Image (cartoon, rainbow, N blue to C red):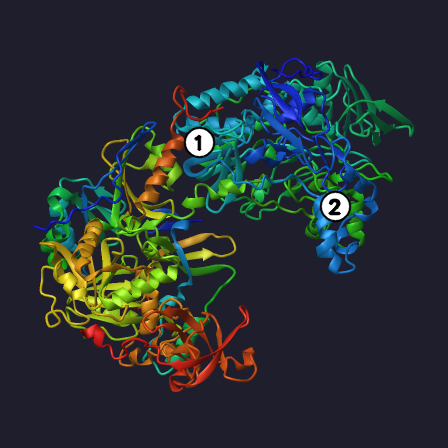
Amino acid sequence: MIIDHPLLGPRDSSEFTYMGDAALIDRPDPEAEDAAQAFYEYAYLRDNPAGWHRELWFHEAGDRSWLVVTRNTLTHEISNVELARDVARSRGRSA
Amino acid sequence: MHDLTPTPALGVEARTIGSVTITENSGVALASVAARRGESDVCANGLKALLGAVPEVGRAVLHDPEAGFWMGPDQWMIGAPMATHEDLADQLKVRFGTAASVTEQSGAWVVFDVTGDSMPDLCELLCNIAIRKMKAGDVQRTVIHQLGCFVIRRASDDHIRILGPRAAAGSLHHALVTAAKSIAQAPGTAEGRPVA
Amino acid sequence: MRMKTAAQKNRLQGGQIDRETELTFTFDGKRYRGHGGDTLASALLANGVRLMGRSFKYHRPRGPVSAGSEEPNALVELRSGDRQEPNTRATTAELFDGLQARSQNRLGSLSFDLLAVNDRLSNFLTAGFYYKTFMWPKAFWEKLYEPVIRRAAGLGSLSLREDPDVYDKGFLHCDLLVIGAGPAGLMAALTAARSGVDVILADEDFRMGGRLNAETLTIDAAPAADWAARTVAELADLPNVRLMPRTTVIGAFDHGIYGAVERVSDHLAAPQPDKPRQILWRIYTRRTVLAAGAIERPIAFQNNDRPGIMTASALRTYANRYGVAVDRRAMIFTNNDDGHRTAADLQAKGIKVIVADVRPETPRALDYEVLAGAQVTDTMGRLGLTFVKLQLADGSERMVECGALGVSGGWNPNVHMTCHHRGRPQWNERLAAFVPDSRPGGLPEGMTVAGAANGDFSTAAALEGGARAARAVLDLRGALPEIPKAEDRPVRLQPFWQVKGAGRAWIDQQNDVTVKDVTLSHQEGFRSVEHLKRYTTLGMATDQGKTANIGGLAIMAELAGKSIPEVGTTIFRPPYTPVAIGVLGGRHRGQQFHPKRLTPSHAWAQEQGAVFVEVGNWLRAQWFPRTGETTWRESVDREVLATRGSVGVCDVTTLGKVDVQGADAAEFLNRIYCNGFAKLPVGKTRYGLMLREDGIAMDDGTAARLAEDHFVVTTTTANALSVYRHMEFVRQCLVPDMDVQLISTTEAWAQFAVAGPKARRVLEKIVDQDISNDAFPFMACANVTVCGGLRARLFRISFSGELAYEIAVPTAYGDALIRRIMAAGAEFGITPYGTEALGVMRIEKGHAAGNELNGTTTALNLGMARMVSTKKDSIGAVLSRREGLNDPGGLRQVGIRPADRADQIPAGAHLMAATGPVDAAHDQGYVSSACYSPTLGHHIALAFLKNGANRLGETLRVVSPLTGVELAVEVCSPHFVDPEGDRLRA
């Protein structure tokens, strides 16, 4: 596969390490009342759909960016690639 | 002044195989510079003052005595002659202050210069980069013989510089040499491989 | 002395062979001659040899069916000794002088194969026979039936020696990849190349031109092969074209990545020195034109597998390209006009030809006999065809004496590569064949198909199709280039798959699958094409049914009373043709399987005679044997005692190091470590434990605060990469606005542990600053200088439990520093120690390592529960508090020692009560690390024991049913040596 890195352009997927569901960005609030349940779901109940999926890929043999890759797991079609840091910020993560 | 003698990563002589020459270059001091949060502009100005320009994504600024290339978002590698810049990291720390995080990298890398007409053929056996489309100053991080390396296309057309992990210098050199032998044309033949 | 060889009795005039070059080769030990440009098959046929192998199951005599890579039958062993290579297609093996070839799958000689008895047993060896016939008694399967069947059925044999050749892998990039260099491929490449884009043209053959080399057609009034040669020459002169003959594109992978195997040296007896035998290329292309041609298909009839029976086009190729008559008398059995083209070509070469055409209406023949409405009903000839039996249109029979029978059931577009992304070829009624699915999404992205592969069977259509495909796929503007003039005959064919009869008619010759097998499979309910394939093995093995599949489908359709498109088709997967494992491995074998990472003290350690061990890719000194030491234990015990008694030194460069800088560096470490770092003063180091988000321990190490905004984090050697990746994940994805920058510095610093009561005395001679206990206490860290000014880092940390330091200098000075440390320590008898002594000392001290941080243990298990701060958020903190992980009776790390101090405790053994049953239900825990402690003089171990913290002093049993060990042990503190830590702080 070829991943169109937002900064570096098309790069072979063999340069990347895969970590699955990009929902890992949405780490629950540890202070919340239901933190235990929320973390349980966060750690264990991840999606693995046959079809479009937002996934985390790490450009290990490249610029060390984590990317969010929107990929169809049936066809390997990739429709969008974003820097995970940008995605994280857009989802309200900061420090 | 201390009295310890440095050793090169490999300490091998330059080797010419066919039309490719592979030379270990122990004379490069290296340090990384990463912009602190909110200091991108200050850091960029520092780089500009140092190199004449800020290396863009995937690019190097081949400047003397310091040169630099882009490593990742807000992160650059600076190189300079070891003879005059052994304390490069300290120099950069002074220059950038709290605008950037500076890390000494001299010891982490082995540097090979590869030159010669068949350099692109060599690259095709070594790593997944479109070497024939690379221009002077293009830099790519890639994998050679399972090792994460930087490949920098230098000013002269037939020259690349490879930065590889120092501890694996022997394996990397072996990979370069075997690939060079593989593409070298047998003496007396006009072409390496039959075309048709 | 030159051995005598017979004349090439079936060699004709003409062809694309080099008659000036005479090559000598052997087949089954007998010597023959051929020419440059021959394949092994064409040269053998020129010498009158039709019999080239025995079939897979029935050991039937077999000869080539084709003249190309689709060959199911003529598989031979090439070369000898360590270069012996089984299952090579004689039809593609390029002849070279001195080639040695042998037939395979025979017991005895090829002409008298003892296993030919299987042919008489064929009633027991039908489809799925191994599921039925040999089921009983059960034990006989493994011991008797399977070995016997495997011995009898099979292909070639391996040399069982190491391959002496090398293989390369490489990467190519282009705008257009053209697969196949026939008329369509050449025109596509030419059209694209003239527009200036980068083109790769790959063809599996050693001579480009495809069928143009095998035809008597003309292009622009000149022989087609000449046009092909001229076009190839023009392409070769263009700087933007890379011609790759002898290169098989094996697969279409995602996003325009193609795999290709270039056979660099297969046409030589041995590769040139240092040159690869083959290269596996990964080709990255924007667009692809697939011009893979078409494959002629056979017709099934009784005994259609005798040597001398092949596709009509193969007969034509042998005659036109190689100047070879398979026999001077030939028959053609056809259902279409193309069979007549073969007949005309053979007749023109002086071969006597008769055509049996199943159609009542046939083209008018000029100079050969045509039997309209005739069918071949049987053949004769024990080791090769001698007679063909025909049923004529009027029902009468006729015997024809001939040694060659060319069969043409029509042509199948070569759709293999169009299926690699699960594309399903579509049935074309006019051609009675499957053609590529040209609807949107039907082909791999970026691919277009041209020429015969697309069902355009005339030369003119192929030439134009190639040019148009290149233009379309590259979006080129401007006029179509001039298309050379060539024949444009339409396809005329009457679908015809089998001649009905009582005897066996082969569909898949490689797997010995007959019409009967397909019928049986249908009767037994295997009615999907995929089931048919698995049950009968139709279309499996080296040729993957390139000539067989369609025949099987047609017969299945007939049995089911359906049309072929209703039955459907199996699809193809990579690779297109078999690929040697060697080329997939490339250079990564033997010593080069992985890169080797050497520590900065490697050369010095080698001088000391160190024994090395691989840790990840690192080579680390395991121990340093001295003269007179006969076992590793002697060396290790000495190293431990010397270190604890005086001072030792060990290279610890391999531990991962990450430079963490930025205003939020401390807060960042607070987040990744379960224990606190915010308040760690500058100049201090702290042990840190990282958890995974699920609460399980991930890795441990130290973080040294060199400045307010600068830490150096260490990781274990094994987890250096994954911990760095995790830290980047946290930085970029969880805390994107923290001011923190990371970079690995593992290899930037050479780092040595100097440990033992005399460690300070040694380092005082090296470090330029005051390192007294007051100035540089336990867990201190600092940037220092050594040997009169070299920048260095010093950490007062200890894995061994002794007074210890780790000192780091830029890697280039590592060799000099280890020699200086040894010199400085000489007066104290400083002893280098390896990873074994390191391991013994950490077990004696009760420090967890990889065996304890094994992916199942928590901080609580490790006895570090209090480290998990509840005052702050850190990765894994929430889930570490789960009830299930906090069972008071759960596993705790303890020490154990044998009740009889002479006993040895095996690592991995389980703990059971002192008496009672030994089973999983009574399991109390397990031993994670064990060693002999030279300090204590007996074996010791670390273990995880249920409720262990409260069971010190108990006696338990250690059992290892695997090794038969069962012995009594005592539970004790895991800190065997210096539990109070006085030595550390000395």
Q: Residue C909 carries which label?
A: none
**Residue B162, horizontal then vertical, whole percent:** 28, 41
Q: Badge 1: few (under 14), some or many (20 or more) residues near its Cα, within 10 Å?
A: many
Q: Give amino acid for label 2.
A: Ser
Q: What element carries label 2?
A: loop
Q: Which chain carries label 2?
A: C
Q: Where is residue C47 in the image (x, y as percent from the top left)?
A: 69, 20
Dot placed on the residue nearer the N-terminal end, 2 or 1 = 1
Give the image quarter of residue C377: top right
Vertical order, C451 against B53 (above or below): above
Marks 2 and 1, how far apart at CA: 52 Å
* Residue B58 in the image: above or below residue C680: above
- Look at 78% across and 32% down and name the residue there: C112
What residue is shown at x 79% (from left), y 48% (from top)? C126
- Whether residue C127 appears in this view of the structure is yes
Q: Quick check: C206 left or right of C144?
A: left
Residue furthest front as drawn = C628
- The C terminus of chain C, quarter of image: bottom left
Could you say which disc has been placed on residue C275 in the image?
A: 1
Q: Quadrant of the N terminus of chain C?
A: top right
Residue B195 placement (x, y as % from top left): 47, 25
Which mark is on residue C563? 2
Q: In this view, does C87 lie to the left or right of C754?
A: right
Q: Mark 1 lies on which chain?
A: C
- Amino acid at circle 1: Lys
* Of the pair C641 and C579, the residue shown nearer to us: C641
Q: Position of residue C338 (x, y in %)?
A: 70, 26
Quadrant in the rendering for residue A19: bottom left
Q: In this view, does C548 lie above or below C344?
A: below
